Amino acid sequence: MKILDATIYGFGKWVDYKIDFSDATCIYGENESGKSTIQKFILFMLFGLTPKQRTFYRPKTSGKMGGKMTVLHSEIGEFRIERLDEVNNGAAACFTKDGKTYDEAWLKEQLNGMTAKTYESIFSFSALDLTEIRNMKDEDLGEVLLGIGMTGSNNIYAVEKQLDAKIGELFKPTGKKPLMNQKIESLNRISDSLQSFREVEASYREKKETVAQLEQELTQLQIEMKEEKKVAFTIEKQLHALPVIHEYHKLKKQLEDYPETIKFPENGVSRLEKWKESLLPLKSEWNIVAGHEKKYKQKIATIEQDLHAKEIGQEAKGLLDEKKRIQSQCGELKKLQTAVSHDELQLNEAMDRLHLGIQVKELASLELPFYLEKAWTQLKNENEQLKLESEQLDNEQKQLEQEKHYMNNQIKQLKESILSDSHVHELRDRLDTFKSTQLMDKLKRDAKKREEAQNKENQLASNVLIGSIIVAILLGIGAILTDYSWLYTIMLLTLVLGIGQWLMTKRTNKEFDHVLEDYHEQSGQQVTEAERREAAELLEMQEKYKSEQAALQEQLKLAHIQYIKWNEKQNLLAEREQRLEEQICRHYESHPFLKQMEMAYWPELYHHLKHVLKLIKDWQKHMDEVATLEKQLAIDQQNLERFIEKLGVTNSGEDLEEKLQTIEQIHNVQLEKRKELNYYKQLLADLKEKQRELQESMQTYETEIERLFNLAAVDTEELFYEKARQSEEKATLEKELAKTTTQHKNLLSTEGLQQFGKTMVTETELELNRQHTEESMQSLESKLEKVRENLADTKAELVAMESTESYSTSLHQFEMETEHFNQLGKEWAVLKTAKEILTETKRNYRANYLSKVIEVTTLYFKEITDGKYVQVYAPTDSSVFQVESIDNIRYTVNELSQGTIDQLYVALRLAISEIMSEKHGLPFVIDDAFVHFDSIRIKKMIAILQQVAEKQQVILFTCRQEIASAVTEMKQIDITEKVQNI
């Protein structure tokens, strides 16, 4: 697995920071620059942190804690790990290239169960690990290095020491301080004490059996004594109950004088009194209701005489139903009259503002089509546009005349400045002569060189001619000898080429000589540089003037064209003005009042006219509504006057509202009388209902009284009360008899009660029975006293044997000590087993991995020390780590320097990481572990790390500039400047 990049959202002092990693990366930064924080962030992304640790690394300047990291897996490929403190309690979310998302469990599966602690032990180490090893004793250093080789840290050393210490605290074959040794001695001491107590145990058991027999005999005697006391108590109760028994027989004799059964209802007298009391108020209420009935009938007759007929009431109600409408119409009429006044005022003001000299009636008949506003606006705009275009045409005319005059003046001036044709020809000849002079001077300078070249060319041409003649001769001879006709053709071509080349060379030389001769003939004409410059400037000005003249001629033609276009525009403008004037005349004919107003105000006039027409329309509408309401209200007044006259009311007022108020008052009085009539009728109906209810209630009570008489089998109230007295006396006697029976039950048993209920017992018989019972009790009491004395003596002897509690205490202590000893034994067995398992694990490690680790350690240690040490030997039971020098001399670890020990430790950690990376393949992280390395061994170490980086990713953290400078082939990241910005 390889880390490609990491982005920190917020972690410690790092906020929004991204790091790109390679196979070998060196991160340089001074102390307190955040290297350890980045290292912790890598662990956080791979394995997570506890909530407390996440709180510690929460950034001070950001509310977001977490980040993301992209890794490359050998099997899955590239995927991204993302963790946020506030999402899923810091759990990881993994995103693969195919868009799938996985959780924390999937990430642990890809890490092959690796934990943060194991990772730091195997794939990460720092100067702190070296410090721990330096603080250990020399004789233990070899065993600690072996422990690191097994687990990747020195934890196994501490665990083994703790196991030995715990086992020693629990048990040793010799000694008194271990806990189990102390328990064994204590158990032996308690066992000796228990043996002496067991000797007296036999006599103790015999006394226990005697006590049990005496207690059983004592219990039997106590039971017999209890029975005798019970008999004596019964006799005493019978003596006390004799008066009650005599009273019982007396009451029973009196009850025999009454009939066996007396028919009388239960609580008959109280029930009769109750019904009589309930019936009395009902009769009084019946009399009151009858008086009220007479009074209400008189009141109803009086009210019916004062009521009008129902038809008049209905007519009054119909008129009053129209009250709201009439009042509303009156209010609406006042509002309309006010609106009419307001409309007339606004209409007069609007007519005054127009000043058109027309009347309202004329305006009312005026029609303003919807398109008229648009037409007037177009006429206004067209008029303004024509005026504007006319002004523009005048300005264009003036501008064209000015431009034409200016161009004519310019052309005239240019004609005066242009040179004559002969003067121009003379200046051009002067320039040609100057150029020819320069060329001839150059040919003259090259004449000698050219002469030598001609000689060489002539010689070469002669040689070529001679060679071609010789070749042609040879080819001719060959053709003659071989009869090959094509050889003649080649012979001729060769001869022609040789002669042609010679002739061309001669011709070229003659032409060059002719040029030289012409130069010598013209050498009499000389032109200086100043004359040439003057001629060139004059010709340049000549060309400039001609081009300006041509341009002005073109501009003059364009101006003439513009003037023609101006005339066309002027003609079009006149035609448009003519059409506009015709349209205005047509509008004057249809709306003569427009002559009194300028065309610019016609659109506004249209809006004012529309407003005035609206005012006229509203005024006419309000006037029509006023007439309609006045007509309706007149009809309503006639109806009210007719109804009031029917009622015979003289003083009803003149106004509609006063007449309505009079009718409403009369109607309300009639309604109140009708309500009162209905009220009394209802009261009368209620009285009828009340009388019916009273009749039913009275009938109920009378029926109940009659039923009581029937139950008592009497006809009159006097006989009912006589029978009630007899029933009450008999009930009293029965109660007394029952009370006496209850007293018997309290004093005597059920059998005694039945016995005395049948026969009478004398006091003498009871006294004799009591004396006999007392004698039996005295005999039992003497026997009990003797048994108690024997039991007390035997128990005293037992109490003397048990008074010290030494035996029970010793026995309890022995049991407790035995249980505690067993617990200690279990704990000792667990620790001993753990020690054996640890030892067996170390043996298995030596058998499986130690040879590979020591072999790789030897290679790294040999390279780090530049071949000074050639072999590393693992520790045995009798020796520690040893190294062998190039001189075949062995040294133990405590004989090496501190720097060499650190180098041996680094080599061992690198070897462990390489062996373990075959299974896990995680990045190897080093944090300033080369503290005691000199510059030479630092370079060796860097070279080794670069070799390791070919198989496993390496991340080096350092604060030393020399190490950062030495890692030239690693990717370097300097975080110092970033920290300063933070």
Image (tube, rainbow, N blue to C red):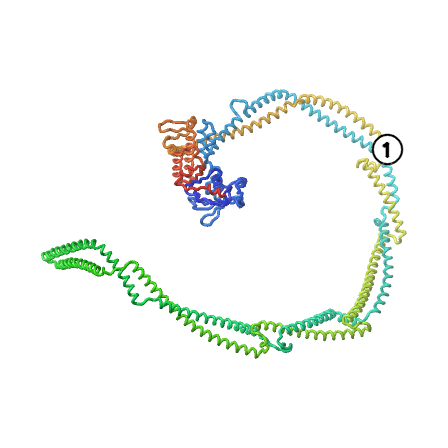
Residue 390 in view (yes/no): yes
Q: Is residue 327 above or below residue 466?
A: below
Q: Residue furthest right?
A: 718
Dot 1: what SS? loop
Q: Nearer the viewer, residue 646 or 775?
A: 646
Q: Nearer the viewer, residue 682 or 500?
A: 500
Mark 1: amino acid = Thr
**How many numbered discs sit on the rendered protein?**
1
Residue 618 x %, y %: 65, 73
Q: Which residue is mark 1?
A: 762
Residue 476 x %, y %: 11, 57
**Image-based side of 131 in relation to 791, left or right:** left
Residue 837 in view (yes/no): no
**Image-based side of 2 in relation to 717, left or right:** left
Q: Nearer the viewer, residue 346 or 879?
A: 346
**Image-based side of 181 in relation to 228, left or right:** left
Q: Residue furthest left?
A: 481
The image quadrant that residue 676 belongs to is bottom right
Residue 282 x %, y %: 85, 56
Q: Nearer the viewer, residue 302 or 46?
A: 46
The image quadrant that residue 220 belongs to is top right
Name the image quarter holding the N terminus: top left
Residue 936 x %, y %: 38, 34
Q: Is residue 438 above or below residue 123?
A: below
**Image-based side of 524 in relation to 382, left or right:** left
Q: Is residue 53 above or below residue 706?
A: above
Residue drawn where x is 37% and y is 30% of the image: 868
Assess disc 1: are there few (<14), some (14-19) or many (≥20) residues with their C-alpha within 10 Å of its C-alpha. Answer: few
